[in-house]
Image (cartoon, grey):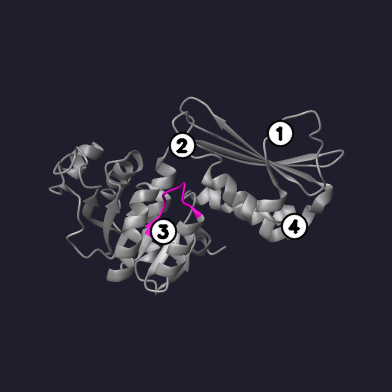
Amino acid sequence: MPSLAIHGAAGRMGRRLIALATENSNLKLVAAVEFPGHPDLGKDAGSLAGVGSLGLGLSSTLDVEPDVIIDFSSPQGTRKIIPLCAQRKIPLVVGTTGLTGEDHQAIAQAAGQTAILQAANMSLGVNLLIALAAKVARQLGDDYDIEITEAHHRFKKDSPSGTALAIAGAICQATGKSVDRDLVHGRQGADTERRRGQIGMHALRLGDIVGKHDIHFASLGEEIVLAHTATTRDVFARGALRAAQWLADKPAGRYSMADVLGL
């Protein structure tokens, strides 16, 4: 049974990972880590997650050697855990969003020393949606307009969502397009007529929406919509736990949820 550490353990996703890890017979939770100075340091991780005492305190350092780490912290936190995992050759699942191009370069470099799985969205359904969107776009071609909409809760900081960007990236890769050249974020002005091959991107921030992504493909006569709605963050946590179990014994390299799903 692989041993697991959670980085960003006191956050919303971290607490759900702790709670669901206690129900998972295929993983053993051995560490819960947060940034130095966090107000909950020293508290029992299970109590923080609402599942009762686990005898495992929240720590600012990783004092054990887990078989795999799940990171759901912040871009700043991810930047600190990546070199640690590379140095200690600990497989790492990165679920943190809002990462920069430099962060992805750091992940690629660290993947030469340990196994790293990074995904904008850990939901199994969303990753299937990404693969389907790429296939549909490739088959339909530029006679069909493509618009991507995403909706999240009012507290989400980054926009558009990492998942929406992953969908756009997969479509571009499948159709020979460029995210920098062909992706348009919203529309405003007197002359916003669509350019052939353009991909529209729109972000909504509403209430407590966990996550909703829709990809519209429309021609002059029909529309196809691929959609995914998450009603609980548990789908992301369960996907991350499945990814961690899968990654724990993998050789150094960069992996994705598509690898976990065999897509």
Look at mark 3 in the image and give the residue it sits on. Answer: 243
Q: How crowded is mark 3: few (under 14 residues within 10 Å), some or many (20 or more)?
A: many
| Observer-nearest of 173 and 220 | 173
Look at mark 4 in the image and give the residue it sits on. Answer: 138
The disc, 1 or 2, on the residue closer to the chain's N-terminal end is 2
The disc, 3 or 1, on the residue closer to the chain's N-terminal end is 1
The disc, 1 or 4, on the residue closer to the chain's N-terminal end is 4
Look at mark 1 in the image and give the residue it sits on. Answer: 187
Q: Position of residue 88 (x, y in %)?
A: 27, 70
Report the Cα–Cα distance between label 4 and label 2: 32 Å
Q: Give the range drawn in magenta.
A: 93-100
The disc, 4 or 2, on the residue closer to the chain's N-terminal end is 4
The answer to whether residue 46 is seen in the rendering is yes
The answer to whether residue 71 is seen in the rendering is no
Q: Is mark 1 on a helix, strand or loop?
A: loop
Residue mark closest to the camera, 1 vs 4:
1
Report the Cα–Cα distance between label 3 and label 2: 25 Å
Report the Cα–Cα distance between label 1 and label 2: 21 Å
Left or right of 135? Residue 152 is left
Q: Where is residue 17 in the image (x, y as percent from the top left)?
A: 32, 46
Q: Where is residue 56 in the image (x, y as percent from the top left)?
A: 15, 49
Which residue sits at x=40%, y=68%? 110
Look at mark 2 in the image and give the residue it sits on. Answer: 157
Which residue sits at x=79%, y=52%? 140
